Image (spheres, rainbow, N blue to C red):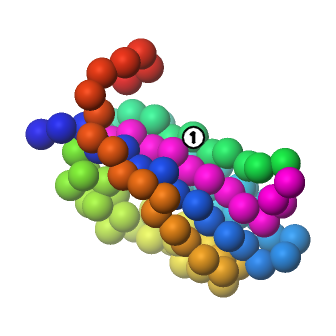
Amino acid sequence: MNQYSQFTKFMTKDNQGDVLVNLLLQASEEMERHQPCQIYLINTAKKEENIIYVYEVWSSKEAHEESLTLEVFQNLIKRAKPIIVNIEVVSTFEFVAGKGV
């Protein structure tokens, strides 16, 4: 299986970007214990305070999909849904080579 990566854009309700960042930080802490997740980066854009980008690298697409069913992540998703206006998977990638993975 090839490594799988995903770049996702989240748009929150006004003044809720920091709340989502905090929830994503909690997810990131959980990812430390979840070996199939190799990279989980949370990014903000200076001129778009309600936009958060997440870049993730996984051992496989199946591992990513499976993680979304775990109780700890389901609970974080439930807490995030009320403040999210839109989620856009900007792109998905299959890892070829490079530094950092």
Q: Is residue 73 visible?
A: yes
Q: For this rendering, which residue is in front, 75 or 95?
A: 95
Residue 79, horizontal then vertical, whole percent: 62, 75
State the image quarter where residue 2 is shown.
Answer: top left
| Residue type highlighted by circle 1 | Leu
Give the labeled residue for mark 1: 41
Name the image quarter holding the C terminus. top left
Image side of residue 10 versus residue 69, left or right: right
Q: Which secondary structure is most common in the magenta stretch? A: strand
Residue count near mark 1 (Cα–Cα under 10 Å), binned few <14, some 14–19, many ≥20: few
Q: Is residue 79 visible?
A: no
Say above or below: 91 vs 40: below
Image side of residue 27 versus residue 48, left or right: left
Residue 72, horizontal then vertical, whole percent: 46, 62
Q: Residue at x 12, y 40 (%)?
A: 1
Q: Is residue 44 magenta?
A: no
* Magenta-highlighted residues: 47-59
Say above or below: 28 vs 98: below
State the image quarter where residue 94 is shown.
Answer: top left
Q: Residue at x 26, y 60 (%)?
A: 66
Q: Residue at x 58, y 61 (%)?
A: 9
